[in-house]
């Protein structure tokens, strides 16, 4: 099999030819037809999160092993399955739920594999979709994509699921006030479409890049604000109007965006932090109780949430994220473009 392998943190991906994958038990091998390139892959390649104050969280210290084939937004067709895998249709494309857990911890037993204490996430702990073939441990992680194109279905596995799960955490506000979405890259543009699918008011978005703001307006945002404007907070509040800002979804997760969300939010509001750009919390503690604000994190989504999202997608309710497709061997170039902010929507590798 051909793959793009991360062999050292901070290094470029290396094209490798490896022995074909074999299966046993419930395992399934897919021929990869599409794999979205997520900004999280840049963090993985770098090998750390920025914790602020000069501190870093090293993935190597946390047990991430190299070499690794990244890629956690894979779609593929079944080419081999173990004798316990059951019936699978080799003519169909399946999107993979990548947030797989150990199956034994209390989180997994409660249906939250995405919070597993010993995770086996595809493209982070086990080899992912920057390859022409991929092995998963069990067919329960496969979802038929129906009539969707592979490059449209692939981003649902992370971009779609992550923003769906984050929006669900503030679902009670979506019809009362426009939700504020900060960062309208791959995740943010998907979120704009999902707000519509969930029956919410058109969102207000914030981004530094005018090209991304324009794309968000085209996708249905009611206003798009430059996060670098000195009066960005006032502009956000004005765009939201009457009720004040009841919910923010921060898909950047930097000190500046956390400040903006906190300053803009109304009393009793909810801030969901998703982005992993990094830094440390910028809020003065007394304002948290005084504003009675809820600050919460959201990490990808559960298998049950993915089933809900796929239901919405099959009903045609999830607008397609703008995507462009590229061959597998352009992975390094695409990661570079993403880092420079030159990707609108999602770049998808089609091995
Ligand atoms: P992306 O590169 O496609 O988009 C990022 C967007 O943020 C761009 O449009 C950029 O212009 C904008 N931006 C950057 N800095 C900004 C700032 N200070 N103010 C306003 N806008 C700013 O990235 P993506 O794939 O959408 O991922 C976004 C983040 O979410 C990454 O850190 C990624 O690792 C993280 N992520 C988290 C989860 C999770 O479950 N928590 C899941 C997937 C991705
Ligand atoms: Zn991702």
Image (cartoon, grey):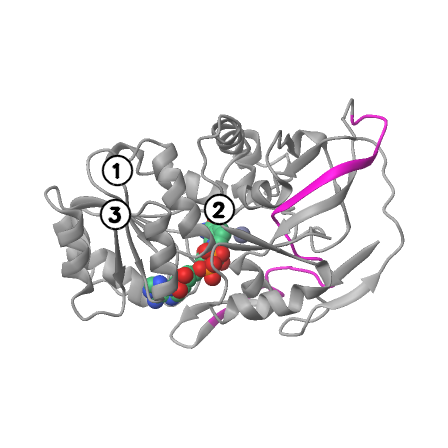
Q: Nearer the viewer, residue 295 or 88?
A: 88
Residue that carries the numbered disc 2 in the rendered image: 321
Task: Determine which of the numbered discs, if any, sits on residue 222 in the image.
Answer: 3
Residue at the outermost left position: 242
Q: Position of residue 14 (x, y in %)?
A: 75, 69
> Residue at 14% across / 50% down in the picture?
291
Q: Residues within 10 Å of mark 2 (few under 14, many from 20)?
A: many
Look at the numbered disc 1 and give the secondary structure of its residue: loop
Give whichever of discs 3 and 1 has the lower sequence position: 1
Which numbered circle lies on residue 189? none
Which residue is found at the position 71% from the left and 57% from the top?
A: 69
Magenta-tinted stretch: 56-85
**Residue neighbourhood size for the residue with mark 1, other residues' Cα within 10 Å, grouped as few (<14), some (14–19), many (≥20):** some
Left or right relative to 226: residue 87: right
- At horizontal 20% and vertical 64% (from top left) the residue drawn is 232
- Judging by the rendered image, the residue that carries numbered circle 1 is 201
Q: Is 283 contained in the magenta span?
A: no
The prevailing secondary structure element of the residues shown in magenta is loop
Give SS at disc 3: loop
Cα distance between the residues tagged 3 and 1: 9 Å
Which mark is first along the chain, 1 or 2?
1
Q: CA distance from mark 2 to mark 3?
A: 18 Å
Secondary structure beneath dot 2 equals loop
Tell me if residue 57 is in the magenta stretch: yes
């Amino acid at each position: 099999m051909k793959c793009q392998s991360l062999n050292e943190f901070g290094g470029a991906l290396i094209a490798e030819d490896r022995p074909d994958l074999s299966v046993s038990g419930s395992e399934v091998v897919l021929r990869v037809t599409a794999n979205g390139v997520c900004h999280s892959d840049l963090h993985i390649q770098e090998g750390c999160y920025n914790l602020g104050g000069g501190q870093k969280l090293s993935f190597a210290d946390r047990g991430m092993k190299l070499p690794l084939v990244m890629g956690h937004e894979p779609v593929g067709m079944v080419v081999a399955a173990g004798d316990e895998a059951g019936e699978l249709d080799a003519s169909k494309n399946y999107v993979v739920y990548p947030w797989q857990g150990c199956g034994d911890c209390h989180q997994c037993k409660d249906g939250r594999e995405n919070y597993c204490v010993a995770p086996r996430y595809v493209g982070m702990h086990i080899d992912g979709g920057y390859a022409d073939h991929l092995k998963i441990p069990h067919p329960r992680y496969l979802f038929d994509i129906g009539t969707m194109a592979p490059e449209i279905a692939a981003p649902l596995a992370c971009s779609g699921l992550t923003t769906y799960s984050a929006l669900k955490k503030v679902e009670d506000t979506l019809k009362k006030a426009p939700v504020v979405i900060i960062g309208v890259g791959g995740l943010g543009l998907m979120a704009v479409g999902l707000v519509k699918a969930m029956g919410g008011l058109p969102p207000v978005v914030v981004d530094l890049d005018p090209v991304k703001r324009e794309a968000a307006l085209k996708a249905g945002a009611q206003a798009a604000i430059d996060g670098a404007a000195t009066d960005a907070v006032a502009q956000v509040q004005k765009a939201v109007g009457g009720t004040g800002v009841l919910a923010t979804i921060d898909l950047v997760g930097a000190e500046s965006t956390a400040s903006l969300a906190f300053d803009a939010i109304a009393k009793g509001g909810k801030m969901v932090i998703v982005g992993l750009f990094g830094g440390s919390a910028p809020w003065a503690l007394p304002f948290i109780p005084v504003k009675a604000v809820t600050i919460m994190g959201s990490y990808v989504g559960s298998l049950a949430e993915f089933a809900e999202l796929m239901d919405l997608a099959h009903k045609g309710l999830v607008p397609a994220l703008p995507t462009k497709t590229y061959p597998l061997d352009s992975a390094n170039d695409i990661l570079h473009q993403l880092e420079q902010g030159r990707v609108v929507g999602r770049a998808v590798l089609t091995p």
